[in-house]
Amino acid sequence: MVEIIYVTRGVLHLGVNDVPIVMRAGEIQFINAGETHYFLASPNSERLVVQFDFFLFHDDEALQINGQPGLRQIFSTMLTNSRQWPEHVTAAMQRLLLNIHEEDEQKAVGYKYLIKARLLEVIALIYRDIPLNAHSPARPLDATVAFKSEKTLARLDKIFSYVENHYHESLTLDDISEYMGFNAAYFTRFFKSNTGTTFVRFLQNYRLNKAKWLLLNEDIPISEVAERVGFNCVKTFHHVFKQDAGMAPRKYKKSISGIK
């Protein structure tokens, strides 16, 4: 799941992959799938949060031109903070995010189609105008590398899509290995070498990010949060969440309440 944070008022304190970030009004931060993040108490601040899964654009893959990096690749190589973008690009992104928020608030007829349309505009803006991270080249160097890269990305996309649809279930390493047609040992090596993390850790981070979204947006018991994101044991959920966010789920919910 990708998360876009747009600070509309005040100063917001958050952490991404254990790196503290201070955002001011008008600034935008992209947080990619699998990245650990948390919000710290930020009195008198307001923000818009837009979240979406790449699976939403599964039917739009035909729009991609051969040779262009895929969605996951472009999101992982873009500069994720608007301080690093040209001013006109930041302004355009602000307008799109505000429009998405307005459509979601008003829920007029056809609003979901308009939200998807605006998200497609966000993607086009990223492809065209948002600078790439110089340390993460988005394009392969030659045809052989391109072929291997496309094959690997297709496999990773299949894995990520499966996680997006089954994270709330009792998903195991054997399950995903069998789904991909690999034995568990080969799958473990493949995933670690291409993502830099283990599948178990990736799945855990994905579930925790889903849990944080539920804590931010829904008023439900912690036990239900744990169950809905794939944790069968509430005690385990508490332990893993606190280890990741530095605080218990209930305290995390209180720390972000009132600053959505």
Image (cartoon, helix red, strand yellow):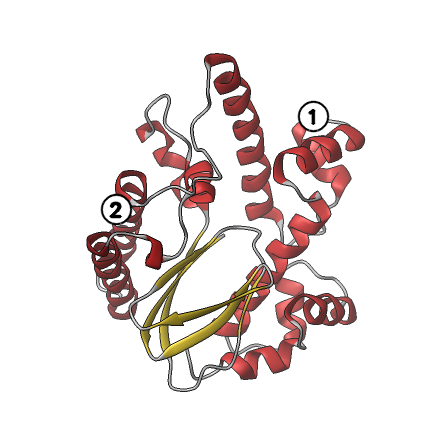
Q: Which label is found at residue 121?
A: 2
- Number of marks in picture: 2
Q: Is residue 133 left or right of residue 162?
A: left
Q: Which residue is mark 1?
A: 181
Closest to the observer, 250 or 83:
83
Label 1: state its secondary structure.
Answer: loop
Q: Quadrant of the C terminus?
A: bottom left
The residue that appears at 56% across and 54% down in the rendered structure is: 35
Alpha carbon of mark 2 to alpha carbon of mark 1: how far?
36 Å
Q: What x and y, as percent, mark residue 206?
A: 60, 54
Label 1 is placed on what type of residue? Gly
Q: Nearer the viewer, mark 2 or mark 1?
A: 2
Image height check: is 98 above or below 164?
below
Query: Alpha-carbon neighbours of circle 2 within 10 Å: few (<14), some, or many (≥20)?
Result: some
Relative vertical location of residue 245 with respect to residue 259 in this rendering, above or below: above
Residue 152 appears in which quarter of the rendering? top right
Relative placement, left or right, of 97 versus 73 is left
Q: Determine the residue positioned at 36% across, 21% down.
A: 66
Q: Are marks 2 and 1 in contact (CB under 8 Å)?
A: no
Quarter-wise, where is residue 205 in the image?
A: bottom right
Q: Where residue 117 appears, x then y in whole percent? A: 25, 48
Q: Amino acid at mark 2?
A: Glu
x then y, percent, for residue 156: 57, 34
Categorize mark 1 by other alpha carbons within 10 Å: few (<14), some (14-19), many (20+): few
Residue 237 circle label: none
As drawn, 66 above or below 34: above
Q: Earlier in the sequence, mark 2 or mark 1?
A: 2
Q: Image point 25% across, 46% down: which residue? A: 121
